[in-house]
Image: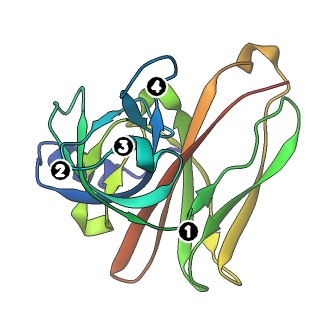
Amino acid sequence: MRFLPVLTAVCILSAAATAQTTIRGKVEDVQGTANQFYLDGTIIPVVSNVLNLNLWQGQHAFLDVTNIGTAAAPILRIDAATPTTKMMDMGNLRLGQTKTWEVFAPTGMAAFIFMDWTPNTRFVPIPQFGGAWLMGGQPFLLAGGVTLGGVFQTTYTTPNNPIFLGLEVTSQALVGSQNIWEFSNVDSKTVEN
């Protein structure tokens, strides 16, 4: 199932916004470099004039960010970070195996899980939905449901085709109830044997 056209229109209209946005995420370093970082689960570079990003590596946080790049090539400046918990966990991706994906949120919340190839990630701030859309323009809607006991779970079976080996997949959830919606952190995994 493809993503809802209405939300896509909102994304396009919001793409030009350069105001500060708070997102859930995790800073990771670019392997083999000094002081070069990206937003985990994406291809989006991150920088900061006020935080030592080395101290935030691997830690889930609410990140106050501003896009100092362009809509087509975002670079996120992180102005503040507050520790938080992981909201989206997509499990592992192994050829032919079924794994459980989870979204952690208060009981009774609607949860929708989207997935796309990691190279398609982008930054589209949508304050109306509490954060930013970090997926591509045409992600796959994997599952939707309601959280029970603080978690929504679904399963995903990675196709048993070696052509997928080494490809990186990213997921993000949209969680909410009535007029209060929020984007999760993105999570990504590499397809393995």
* Left or right: where 76 falls relative to 156: left
Q: Contact, CB < 8 Å: mark 1 with mark 2?
A: no
C-alpha separation, residue under disc 4 versus residue under disc 2: 28 Å
Q: For the residue marked with disc 2, what is the amino acid?
A: Ser
Could you tell me which residue is drawn at 53 percent across and 47 percent down?
A: 58
Give the foreground label among 1 and 4. 4
Residue on which disc 2 sits? 14
C-alpha separation, residue under disc 1 versus residue under disc 2: 22 Å
Count of marks placed on residues: 4
Could you tell me which residue is drawn at 82 percent across and 49 percent down?
A: 99
Q: Residues within 10 Å of mark 2 (few under 14, many from 20)?
A: some
* For marks 1 and 4 on the same chain, the one whose residue lies earlier in the sequence: 4
Residue on which disc 1 sits? 111
Q: For the residue marked with disc 1, what is the amino acid?
A: Ala
* For marks 3 and 4 on the same chain, the one whose residue lies earlier in the sequence: 4
Residue on which disc 4 sits? 30
Q: Secondary structure at mark 3?
A: helix
* For marks 4 and 2 on the same chain, the one whose residue lies earlier in the sequence: 2
* For marks 1 and 2 on the same chain, the one whose residue lies earlier in the sequence: 2
Q: Contact, CB < 8 Å: mark 4 with mark 2?
A: no
C-alpha separation, residue under disc 1 versus residue under disc 3: 30 Å
